[in-house]
Image (cartoon, rainbow, N blue to C red):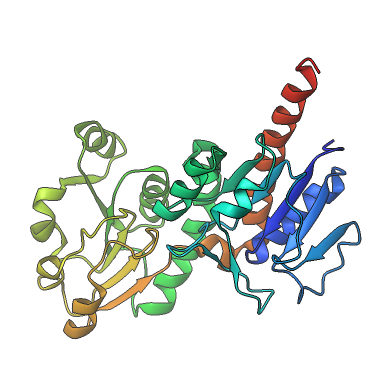
């Protein structure tokens, strides 16, 4: 149980609803900011505008998966209010208040550091990323089916990156009968790709490796599918970029060349928000419980 903990959930999409449900079931006190248009009844949670909210007794703040943008604005699909997370807000919280976010950026890092608060990036955890790769893979399959005129079976698919998502994507497309090649930078990743029975290539050879593929699936969060790479793709090739915004593809050049390129960083929240929310909620509540137990053990 999370009895005695006060948590502010600030903004987010349908995934947050599962998290809120989990928190209220475990008897946490929950304040919702950026949810005034939400019809779902969380009778034990209170709704506040950010200008009216009192942060002085918060134990934790939960942000959406993207955190904030570079101006501190938080996505709020259940509100028309512009919600901005500032250093002043964090300064008004207790010193033990922890901020939870899926990922972060320079803005969020800077205000958390300046306020001397703790930031937990949930999507940097192996458990969250691996569980989350399941709906990501399902969504990727859906997009490939929707945007191609050929079967996945026997198509040539290139996966860029062998991180937690890349490995799941490569393994699943291989099991569906695609001819999969995987690009990586580290020698140990090259070895793992070969061990998985897939074709491996180094990023330095990416232009040659991608010239004959039907589908490119990128998971690398830096621009790796450059104009030079795109210029050598087949005209019918499809690019699906799963990396966080702005992705790793030169979308401007892809459009100019007539290559369909889709940025899809939040697939779990689109194709399976209930499951994706449960993944976040289960891990978050475990972390909150550990934090609560530690504070109970501290001498008063």
Q: Position of residue 74 (x, y in %)?
A: 56, 65
Q: Position of residue 32 (x, y in %)?
A: 76, 61
Using the rendered view, name the quadrant where residue 221 is placed.
bottom left
Q: Position of residue 33 (x, y in %)?
A: 72, 63
70 left or right of 158 in image: right
Q: Is residue 298 above or below residue 88?
A: above
Q: Is residue 205 above or below residue 142?
A: above
Q: At x 36% / y 73%, what residue is drawn?
A: 262
249 left or right of 147 in image: left
Using the rendered view, name the quadrant where residue 75 is placed.
bottom right
Q: How many marks?
A: 0
47 left or right of 176 in image: right
Using the rendered view, name the quadrant where residue 40 is placed.
bottom right
Q: At x 36% / y 49%, what residue is drawn?
A: 166
Determine the residue located farthest toward the top in the rendered image.
299
Determine the residue located farthest toward the right in the rendered image.
43
Q: Quadrant of the C terminus?
A: top right
Q: Is residue 101 above or below residue 297?
A: below
On the question of residue 129 being in view, the answer is no
Q: Quadrant of the N terminus?
A: top right
Q: At x 43% / y 55%, what residue is drawn?
A: 107
Is 24 in front, or is 196?
24
Q: Position of residue 197 (x, y in %)?
A: 28, 40
On the question of residue 65 being in view, the answer is yes
């Amino acid at each position: 149980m999370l009895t005695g903990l006060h948590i502010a959930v600030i903004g987010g999409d349908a995934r947050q609803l599962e998290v809120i449900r989990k928190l209220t079931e475990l008897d946490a006190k929950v304040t919702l900011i950026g949810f005034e248009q939400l019809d779902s009844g969380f009778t034990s949670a209170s709704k506040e505008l950010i200008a009216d909210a009192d942060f002085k007794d918060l134990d934790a703040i939960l942000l959406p998966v993207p955190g904030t943008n570079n101006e501190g604005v938080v996505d709020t699909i259940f509100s028309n209010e512009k919600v901005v997370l500032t250093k002043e807000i964090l300064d008004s919280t207790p010193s033990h208040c922890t901020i939870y976010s899926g990922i972060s950026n320079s803005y969020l890092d800077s205000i958390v550091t300046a306020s001397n608060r703790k930031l937990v990036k949930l999507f940097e955890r192996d458990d969250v990323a691996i569980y989350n790769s399941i709906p990501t893979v399902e969504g990727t399959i859906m997009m490939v089916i929707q945007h191609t005129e050929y079967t996945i079976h026997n198509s040539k698919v290139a996966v860029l990156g062998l991180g937690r998502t890349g490995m799941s994507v490569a393994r699943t497309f291989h099991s569906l009968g695609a001819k999969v090649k995987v690009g990586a930078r580290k020698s140990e990743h090259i070895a793992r790709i070969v061990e998985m029975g897939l074709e491996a290539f180094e990023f330095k050879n990416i232009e040659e490796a991608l010239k004959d593929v039907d589908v490119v699936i990128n998971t690398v969060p830096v621009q790796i599918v450059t104009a030079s790479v795109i210029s050598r793709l087949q005209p019918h090739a499809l690019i699906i970029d799963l990396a966080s915004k702005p992705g790793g593809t030169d979308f401007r050049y892809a459009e100019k060349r007539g290559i369909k390129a889709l940025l899809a960083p939040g697939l779990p929240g689109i194709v399976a928000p209930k499951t994706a929310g449960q993944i976040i909620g289960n891990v978050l509540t475990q972390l909150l419980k550990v934090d609560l137990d530690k504070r109970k053990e501290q001498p008063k």
